[in-house]
Image (spheres, coloured by chain):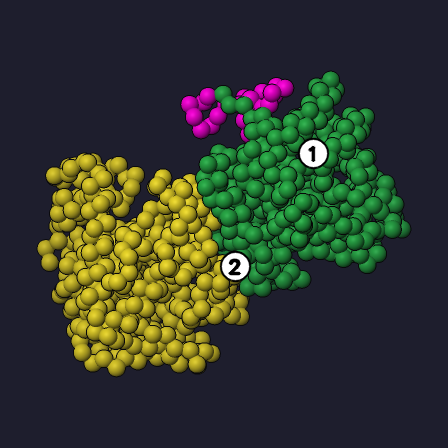
Amino acid sequence: MSDAANPLVFKIISECKTTRARVGKMNLPHGEVDTPVFMPVGTQGTLKGLLPEQLQKLGVQIILSNTYHLGTHPGPDILEKAGGLHKFMGWNGCLLTDSGGFQMVSLLKLAEITEEGVKFQSLNDQKSEVMLTPEHSIKIQNTIGADIIMQLDDVVKTTNPDKERIEQSVHRTTRWLDRCLKAHGKPNIQNIFPIVQGTLFKDLRKLSAEDLVQRKVKGYAIGGLSGGESKLNFSEIVHYTAPLLPKEKPRYLMGVGFAIDIIICCAMGIDMFDCVFPTRTARFGCALIMTGQLNLKQKQYKKDFNPIDKDCSCSTCKNYTRAYLHGIVTMHPVACHLLTVHNIAFQQRLMKSIRESITEQRFPEFVKIFVNGLYPQRDYPKWVTKALTSVNINLAD
Amino acid sequence: MKFITKSLVRCAPRLGVLKDIDNEHSLSIETPLAMLYTRGGSIPHITHEVYQICCKDPQIIQIPVVSTYQFQDAMEEYDGSISEFVGMKSCISCVTVQDPGDLTQPGHHYKDYVPLWTRSGKILLNSDKYMDIIESFKPDMYYLLSDGDTNVASAQKRVTKAVDNTIHFVNKCLERHKNSTILQNAFVMAPITGGYCLRSRKRCLDELKSKELIDGFLIDGLHNNGPEVEFLTFDEIKDVIDLVVKDAPDNKLLSVQGCWNPVTIIKMVQKGIDVFDTSYCYIVTERSSALTFSMDKDSNLQGYEINLRQLRYADDFQPILPGCECLTCTKHSRGYIYHLVAVQELLGSLLLTIHNIHHFMKFFEKIRHCIAEGTLSELEKLVAEQFDEYQDEIMQGKEKKLNDENEARECLRLRNHPTLEILIRKRKVGVAIVNKAVLQDQGILMSSCDC
């Protein structure tokens, strides 16, 4: 457990000798988190149809919730009365909340970003204009009570070429961080993570990181990626930005969840990931396996009496066949619960394999085996080869 | 599997036990009981993992062919039984024809066939096709094919036809059963049809009661399934139930299917019915409600049911039913469930299902206890008071007054809240007129019943 004065203690346990990958333990007020970690997303105070008991059984140590959604429903008043989100949803593990800014910009067309904050039309009231300021975001996040909370940042899409605007967002993000830190009401039990911005410009990423590392915080996030840029650009920026952040603090790459991306970014020294992908794809009838994914709607599974993955020990793989799942996917909600369990188990197993291979000094071999499983014809995408070469893994060996 | 009851008195509540279950010799299940209702082979929202967290006792799962028809091709090549296939290996399976939780579309009959409205469209079943499915499913227990498409307003012609069809189906299915090695140990339930015409019911029962291999009877054809069954009163079905219970052979398991309310269930138990199902929990969950009726005179009355869509629960951090030992009540609050329901998160229905099934199973436990103690009438009175009070409450909340058939029809068009509308129609217009209006509206009623 973290002590009262220090709500985040991060310890690096082992490091890969070839790449920058590392295994750590992060102690938070609601428990211990083994890193690298994948955080499943439970947007509205629930992880898509799963009981907290099931999450625990899956070994999930931390989940992510969205401030924007929770601020709308049930709203801060109810959460305050309930004594925070942990109590409200019956989850005793760790929680991380985003700032709400990303949803404002992505969900609401009419959002306008000013120095004061993000101005948007409320969905609740009579379309009145509402302003989400850094102070407001932190106040809601203080009420929600997550172990890690995120600063409100000024997000610019990676596909936006306007460098002037991006530079402005970098500076504004730092100013907003200072306002967030000042407004933070529970520094003893909640940690604010700043977010490095700068889209695809290395100089701006550097500027952003250098500003942020001067603040007294316990960990950092890399934001503004995974938003439509090419994989080549994406991996290059992660590779460039990660070492700009202090080695002894956890690094969180926001919005990344595909297995191959996670593995490569772990090799670049990232410790935390989150993504809706595993749970969202479950709802569309897709099950994740080490060599890709199965779309269980396809006819080929009609008489397939194998589990989704014979090496998976989740309750879905232990009790159900592909044939049965094929018969109920996208028809009955129970199918969605079953695939969600499997997909989270998959992410957990992936992260565990990554951690174990790092600890046992065989991470580069693990990466090669994984990549060759995904591309059995050895037709690796260029970005994969390039990204791995940058961390001293040569697939041609 | 065998059904054993020591009770020899007719038309009286009875305790019994199902035992000598294939592969599960040590297992025995007490009656009266509720089978666990499934759709597509799963209890709505409940995975095997959650089932194991919530259910400790052995149970029977009710598997309607209408929602599992799509598994037939796979089942023909699958080694195990249907309960294994649907991930509920530890449960006893009972295959039925129609789905009690959904309105079965009436009509569309063809000679010697029963129409089945599956998700992929209409499928016509005859005895052979049906028995092919049953043989591939390898259930522990099943209902023989029946034509149960009758209700309180059915014309005599339809009733007669339903009985003719059913007798024909049963004979054919029994023939197949006799020659089937796979089904050797399966428990066979024969349907008794005939709508509300006592002569037809008697004809059906007389024709079938002396047949070999039949272990029990289903009183079918009382309704077309779905949420409306909740508001069928015992007075309406009493004569039919009486007739079947009086004339059925000794030691046969007696069952009805459908979303009956707990008051009607107790009344049927008092006549000697042994088997029901939990489809009622499904329709209660679908309207975002939780059953809270008390089964104990001394406990605090919470009201019959609470609807978690009501704003008053938004900041109510009590459990649904204080003192309830289900997982939902021990771990989660009304406020949390209100939130989940409001934002349409699936966990809301899951938590409500856990509570409702738990409460319903407790209710059956209580029924069995009361039979043993001879206090079933007191339980009936207690539950009826709460049920009636709740219906009155809903009524008061609705200003609209309905006096005649036309208004009942108008109401039907406003089917925003079907059960509420049905309730109003029943209370204010009288059962007969309303049923007639409803059924005419749905094009079901062909000519008046002259039975």
Name the amino acid type tagged 2.
Tyr
Please report the bounds of the magenta region as a residue range. A105-128
Q: Report which quarter residue B269 is drawn in.
A: bottom left
Q: Report which quarter residue B224 is drawn in.
A: bottom left
Q: Which chain is yellow?
A: B
- Secondary structure beneath dot 1 equals loop
Label 2: chain? Answer: A
Query: Cα distance, mark 2 to mark 1?
Result: 46 Å
- Secondary structure beneath dot 2 equals helix
Question: Is residue B100 rendered to the left or right of residue A1?
Answer: left
- Is residue A104 or residue B446 the one in the foreground? A104
How far across and how far down the image is residue B174, in percent? Answer: 33, 73
Q: Report which quarter residue B34 is drawn in.
A: bottom left
- Callout 1 crowding tier (Cα within 10 Å): few <14, some 14–19, many ≥20: many
Q: Residue at x 49, y 21 (%)?
A: A129
Q: Which chain is green?
A: A
State which mark lies toward you, 2 or 1. Answer: 1
How far across and how far down the image is residue A326, in percent? Answer: 53, 54
Find disc 2 in the rendering and name its residue.
A324
Find disc 1 in the rendering and name its residue.
A194
- In the rendered view, tell whether residue B409 sits above or below residue B49: above
- In the rendered view, tell whether residue A202 sits above or below residue A191: above
Label 1: chain? Answer: A
- Is residue A46 or residue A392 the one in the foreground? A46
Q: Residue at x 49, y 60 (%)?
A: B50
How far across and how far down the image is residue A192, in percent? Answer: 66, 37
Is residue B436 visible in the rendered image? The answer is no
Q: Main secondary structure of the magenta part?
A: loop
Q: Residue at x 18, y 59 (%)?
A: B234
Question: Per the image, is A111 magenta?
Answer: yes
How far across and how far down the image is residue A52, in percent? Answer: 53, 53
